[in-house]
Amino acid sequence: MGLISDKSIRSEKKINGFYDSIVVKFIQYCENFLYKQAVYQKDRDGFKPFGAVITYETAYNRQDYLCIYFDISIYAGKGRRNTVRKTHIWACKSGELVNPEKIINE
């Protein structure tokens, strides 16, 4: 058996896949909705900048837990900017999302 177990590799793939799907949905939203909204707005009111950004940070990565938070910011012209922050805590060995209460009560 190597240094990294098959279970750890499966967990890593599961966690990465989770965030890959978020990025794919984000790109689809930008291409299919936000872009069309920008074109419609331009035709109606003239050019207004639109934009979208997704960022993430690893907040904690110790003792079998990984905590990641990410921000999704969307600027839809006319000073309207929306930012959403999401946080996920993962059990690294199982690749499962963990309720924060479980960590606090350990």
Image (cartoon, rainbow, N blue to C red):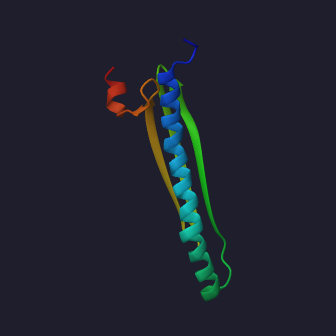
Residue 99: quadrant of the picture: top left
Residue farthest along the top direction in this orientation: 1
Horizontally, residue 59 falls left or right of residue 89, namely right
Above or below: residue 73 compared with residue 92: below
Residue 35: quadrant of the picture: bottom right
* Quarter containing the N terminus: top right
Above or below: residue 22 compared with residue 39: above
Residue shown at 63% from the left, 65% from the top: 51
Residue shown at 55% from the left, 46% from the top: 20
Give how far across and how far down residue 60 sits, in percent: 52, 29
Give how far across and how far down residue 3 sits, in percent: 58, 14
Give how far across and how far down residue 97 sits, in percent: 40, 35
* Quarter containing the C terminus: top left
Above or below: residue 78 compared with residue 61: below
Number of on-image labels: 0
Residue shown at 58% from the left, 39% from the top: 57
Residue shown at 54% from the left, 33% from the top: 59
Give how far across and how far down residue 61 sits, in percent: 53, 26
Residue 103: quadrant of the picture: top left
Above or below: residue 51 compared with residue 100: below
Whether residue 78 is visible to the viewer of this picture, yes or no, is: no
